[in-house]
Image: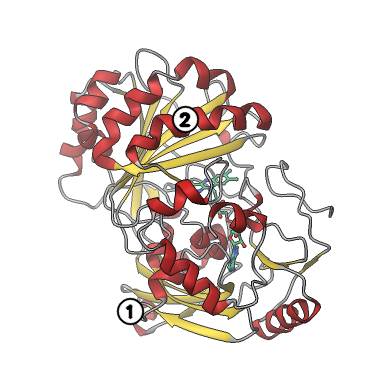
Amino acid sequence: MGNEQNWAGNLRYSAEMVHEPRDAAEVQRLIADAAARGVGVRALGSRHSFNDIADSDGVLISTRLLTGELRCDAEAAAGRAGTVTIGAGIRYGELAIALEERGLAVANLASLPHISVGGAIATGTHGSGDAVGSLATAVRGIELVDGTGAVRMLRHGDADFAGAVVGLGALGVVTRVTLAVEPAFAVAQTVYEGLRWSALLDDFGAITGAGYSVSVFTRWNSDGPDQIWVKRRVTEPGQAAEADALLAAGALAALEARHPLPGISAESCTEQLGVAGPWFERLPHFRLAFTPSNGAELQSEYLIPREHAAEAITALRALADRIRPLLQICELRTVAADELWLSAAYRRDALGIHFTWLQRQDEVEALLPEIEAALAPFSARPHWGKLFTQTTAAIAPLYPRHADFVALAAEYDPQGVFHNDYLRRVLL
Ligand SMILES: Cc1cc2nc3c(=O)[nH]c(=O)nc-3n(C[C@H](O)[C@H](O)[C@H](O)COP(=O)(O)OP(=O)(O)OC[C@H]3O[C@@H](n4cnc5c(N)ncnc54)[C@H](O)[C@@H]3O)c2cc1C
C-alpha cells in the first residue's frame, strides 16, 4: 500500500511508485519498463475520482507536469472559434486563464475548476446545460502513449476517435489534447429558491432550459428543491424571457449569495446575484482559489435519459428518508447527447442525478444498491469516477458500443498493462 491518496482521502493508491514525467518520451520509457517487468500502469490526473479507477498495484504516471505550451490554430489565434492544443495534465482553471488572455473560452466547465483536462475527459466529466455536451465533447484530437509504448495521434473523425476519448485510462496515457474553443463570453449567475416539486416535475424542461447551464440542488425535502442555479450567457437573445420561466413557476431570486450546502458561507462560490462576469468565473460553482464544496465528502452520480426525469425524481423522493441521513446535497443537471462510446450521455440527452455524501463510505455503499435499483428502470449509467456498485454484468448492456470498446482496448493494450481491479470489475 502506497502513501499517496486521492483528493477525498477515501482511497490510498496501492502503487509502488508515482512518476511525474515531463513529456511523451518519458511516458513511453515508463510504460515500456513496466511492461517489461510485468507490472501494471495507470495514468493519474488530479486525483479527484472517488473510486479506484486510477489505482494501480504497479506504477502510477502522474500527468501533473504534462502541461505543455498552449498552441492555437489560426482561427483561435485570431480570437475566433477554432482549436487549442495543450498538455493533458493542465487543470481547467489554469487552462481557462490562458484562454481568457487570448479572448477564448471552452463551452462548459465542471462544478470545480481544479480537475485535470486528461482526467476529466477520460471519465466523461460534465457540467450542466440542455444543449451542452460533456467536457469530452470539446475534444478534437488526442496524443496518447499506448500499452506497447507507441505514441498514437487520434483526430475527430478517425475510426477509433469516438471510442478513445472517454477511455477510462484503458487505452493509454493521454499526453496532449486538442480542444474546440470559441470567443470568450460573459455569464450571469442567479440562484432561485422556493420552487415546489410540482412546478419542477410538471415542466422539467422549462426549468432546465431557463439558462445556458442550470443546476437544481435538493436535500429531498418534501416541499421542493432547495436552490436552482441558473447561469445565463448574457449576450444571448431571449434570455430575459427564459429567466421569467423560473419566476413564473413560483421561484424567487435569492438576494444574497448562496452555497449549495445549507448553512455554509458562499465565500468559496462563484459570483451570483446576476452580476455578469467572465465565463470561467461563473460556469463552475466553486472558485479556483478555494477548496471546492465542503472538502470532506464522497460522491455518486447516475445519468438517465432526460425524458424519464420526472419518474426518476419521483422514485428517489420515495427514498428520501433513506438518502437524507447520509446526504450533504443532491444536484440535478442536464448533459446533451454525444457520440462517445463510453460517455454516460452516449446517444441520449441525459439528466445527471448527483449525490454529495457525508464521508461514511460503508453506509453510503450499503445504500447505493437501493438507489441503483430505483434508477435501473431508467437504464442509469453510473459516473465512472464516483462511487457505484454496479459491475460489468449490469453496465455492459447500458453501452451499445461496450464490446467495441473492450476490443479497442485490447488492440491498444494487448498485454493488459493498463488493467486494474476497477476495469476488471466494471468493464472487462
Ligand atoms: C469536488 C469534486 C467535484 C466534482 N465535480 C464534478 C462535476 O461537476 N462533474 C463531473 O462530471 N464530475 C465531477 N467530479 C468528478 C471528477 O471530475 C472526475 O472524477 C474526473 O475524472 C477527475 O479528473 P482527475 O484529473 O482528478 O482524474 P483522476 O481521478 O486522477 O483519474 C481518473 C481516471 O482518468 C484517467 N486519466 C487521468 N489522466 C489521464 C490521462 N492523461 N490519460 C489517460 N487517462 C487519464 C485515470 O487513469 C483514471 O482512470 C468532481 C470531483 C470532485 C472531487
Up the image or down, 309 lies above or below 220; here it is below
Cβ of mark 2 under 8 Å from ligand 1: the answer is no
Up the image or down, 119 lies above or below 102; here it is above
Up the image or down, 339 lies above or below 371; here it is below
Q: What residue type is labelled 1?
A: Gly
Identify the mark at residue 157; answer none if there is no mark.
Answer: 1
Cβ of mark 1 under 8 Å from ligand 1: the answer is no
Residue 302: give x, y in percent of width and height: 44, 41
* 216 lies left or right of 210: right
Identify the mark at residue 402; answer none if there is no mark.
Answer: none
Up the image or down, 110 lies above or below 292; here it is below
Q: Regarding mark 2 in the picture, which secondary structure is present there? A: helix
Seen at 44% across and 31% down, the residue is 373
* Res. 254 visible in picture: no
- Residue tagged by mark 2? 371
Disc 1 crowd, CA 10 A, few/some/many (<14, 14-19, 20+)? few
Residue 357: give x, y in percent of width and height: 58, 30
* 270 lies left or right of 18: left
Picture quadrant of residue 106: bottom left
Q: Regarding mark 1 in the picture, which secondary structure is present there? A: loop
Compute the Cα span from label 2 to label 1: 37 Å
Ligand 1 - quadrant of the structure image: bottom right
Picture quadrant of residue 211: top left
Q: In which quarter of the image is the C terminus?
A: bottom right
* Res. 368 visible in picture: yes
Q: What residue type is labelled 2?
A: Ile
